[in-house]
Image: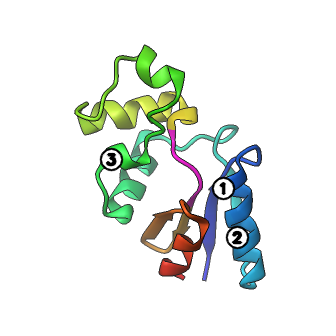
Amino acid sequence: MTVTIWHNPRCSKSRDTLALLRAEGIEPEIRLYLKDPPDAHEIRMVSAWLAHPVIDMVREGETVFRELGLSRSSDDELLIAAMADRPILIERPIVIEGEKAVIGRPPRRVLDIL
């Protein structure tokens, strides 16, 4: 089983999720998505695996969200392009296993896909 975490080490939820995975005996591939951002295609795939609206992947509280004029009713492709261009907009952490994904908020949610 290959598990990947889109991780931001400055985020407590991301750190907690990584610690939870390790406590479960899982050493995930760590993708520092701010340094190695996913492209629009990857974001679109992960969004489909999450089985949630694209807006659920977006950090709406980020200043850039407002600066770009984005809203909850923005078109999915516009949101995907914005996340690809400015990965700070991607909600964290996201844990991926195969073709399943979950946002680790709260961190214990990741156990649902493992």
> What residue did someone put label 3 on?
54
Mark 3 closeness class: few <14, some 14–19, many ≥20 residues within 10 Å: many
Residue 40 position within the rendered picture, expressed as x and y whole percent measured from the top left: 42, 40
The foreground one among 69 and 106 is: 106
| Snapshot quadrant of residue 108 | bottom right
| Snapshot quadrant of residue 80 | top left
Q: Does the magenta stretch include residue 92?
A: yes
**In this view, the mark in front (3 or 2):** 3
Q: How far apart are marks 3 and 1 (CA)?
A: 20 Å
Circles 3 and 2: CB distance less than 8 Å? no
Q: How far apart are marks 3 and 2 (CA)?
A: 24 Å
Q: Is residue 104 above or below residue 83?
A: below
> What residue did someone put label 1 on?
13
Residue 43 position within the rendered picture, expressed as x and y whole percent measured from the top left: 43, 48
Q: What residue type is labelled 2?
A: Pro
Which residue sits at x=71%, y=84%? 24
Horizontal side, residue 53 vs residue 50: left or right? left
- Quarter holding the N terminus is bottom right
- Quarter holding the C terminus is bottom right
The residue segment tinted magenta is 90-94
Which residue sits at x=70%, y=75%? 21
Q: Tell me the tag on residue 28.
A: 2
In terms of sequence position, does the residue under pointer 3 or pointer 2 come before the other?
2
Q: What residue type is labelled 1?
A: Lys
